[in-house]
Image (cartoon, rainbow, N blue to C red):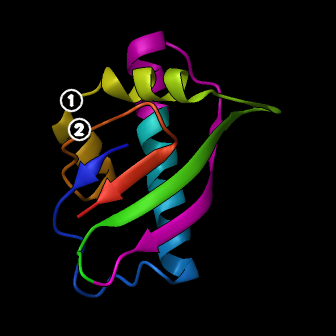
Amino acid sequence: MSVCRFVGVGDDPRSCRFSQMMEQRLEKVFSEAQAKVLNANSRLSVQMLSVSQTAASPAVSLVYAVRNGSAFLNGTAASNLLGQLSAELVGYFLFYPPLIIAEQYCFLLV
């Protein structure tokens, strides 16, 4: 799970456009991590499972699955892969600076 600040005012986390945008950005993050850490270039895909936001908070929770071909990466593998990148680099690809990367298939954007 990543905690990010400053989700844009114009971003509507409930929209399909936001989910698709975050899927594409996460795919870029995982591609970068894979190339940098594993020295590999297989195509990882991301499927957004859930996007939620509580009314009293600017936090947005993204729950997603990462797939390598027909197999899903487990939460630990996905988290470890992202954990090898700096928060600044993850933030560069997501456009939001992350504060925490955890073991779940989840990002929390603030």
Q: Amino acid at mark 1?
A: Ser
> Which residue is located at x 42 percent, y 78 percent?
13
Circle 2 Cα neighbour tier, 10 Å, few/some/many (<14 / 14–19 / ≥20): some
Say which quadrant the C terminus sits in.
Answer: bottom left
In the shown orientation, is residue 88 left or right of residue 90?
Answer: left
- Vertically, is 76 above or below 31? above
In the shown orientation, is residue 108 left or right of residue 47?
Answer: left
Callouts 2 and 1 close, C-beta under 8 Å: yes
Image coords of residue 26 (percent x, y): 46, 48
Res. 19 mark: none
Q: Which residue is mark 1?
A: 86
Q: Which residues are magenta?
A: 31-55
Residue 40 belongs to the span the image colors magenta: yes
Image coords of residue 82 (percent x, y): 38, 29
Q: Which residue is mark 2?
A: 89
Say which quadrant the N terminus sits in.
Answer: top left
- Vertically, is 35 above or below 1? above
